Image (cartoon, helix red, strand yellow):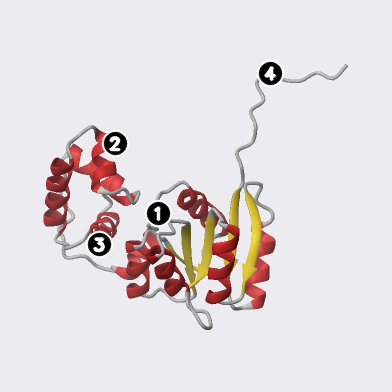
Amino acid sequence: MTEYRADLQPRPKPMRLLLADDQTLVRQGLMRLLSLAQDVELLAEAADGEEALALIRTLHPDIVLLDVRMPRLGGLDVLRTLRAEGNTVAVVLLSTFGDEATALSGLRLGAPFLLKDVDFEVLLQTLRAATNGELVIHSMISRSLHPTTSVSSSTTLTPREQEVLRLMAGGYSNKQIALALGLQEGTIKNHVSSILLKLEVHDRIRAVLSALDLGLL
């Protein structure tokens, strides 16, 4: 007689991943590593941006890992095209170089930016977070983009501003933050404005990066 444990829970569905990188050895190496993760299902690989776009439109992956620099269409161009089409698939950008403009552009479109020498476990954690709708900004990227900050280390935020900032770092909109905290959207806009003023920045992404530099996140 076979005995079954009643408390066994079904495994969550693995994230269906598409990888695009024009360097064959890098691409194949990543595919082999990712195949070892139990919560990753490898859908396909692409050698350039146009191939990646075609596969994304056909296969509808949960997460896309895009090399920034590829022939015909780079990773950032692929990301812009997807968002222009209304495609909200989770994307993580991967690059050999820490380029500020690229990183900020990707973050504004909801895609975290990683360097290719990142620890594999960090890569997995970022993929999982992105699949769950979380926008992760790694401190190593923050340091490479902002090695120094003019904002005083004694900058303080109210407890409510800290809550709002944490949700901003998760990529949530003002409306989503309002729903999460049970507040009016106008109230959240006021909190965001106060956060930007205190951190001496002009947009949400730089606010999060500055907060990381100051240890507020």
Q: CA distance from mark 1 to mark 2?
A: 18 Å
Labels 4 and 3 touching (C-beta < 8 A): no
Q: Residue furthest bottom?
A: 71
Q: Is residue 141 above or below residue 122?
A: below
Is residue 83 something one can see in this rendering? yes
Where disc 2 sits, the SS reads helix
Q: CA distance from mark 4 to mark 1?
A: 36 Å
Mark 1 = which residue? Answer: 136
Left or right: residue 128 versus residue 16 is: left
At horizontal 17% and vertical 37% (from top left) the residue drawn is 184
Q: Is residue 106 above or below residue 182?
A: below
Q: CA distance from mark 3 to mark 1?
A: 13 Å
Where disc 3 sits, the SS reads helix
Q: Residue furthest top?
A: 1
Residue type (three-letter) at the residue carrying disc 3: Arg
Mark 2 = which residue? Answer: 180
Mark 3 = which residue? Answer: 206
Labels 1 and 2 touching (C-beta < 8 A): no
Labels 3 and 1 touching (C-beta < 8 A): no
Labels 2 and 3 touching (C-beta < 8 A): no
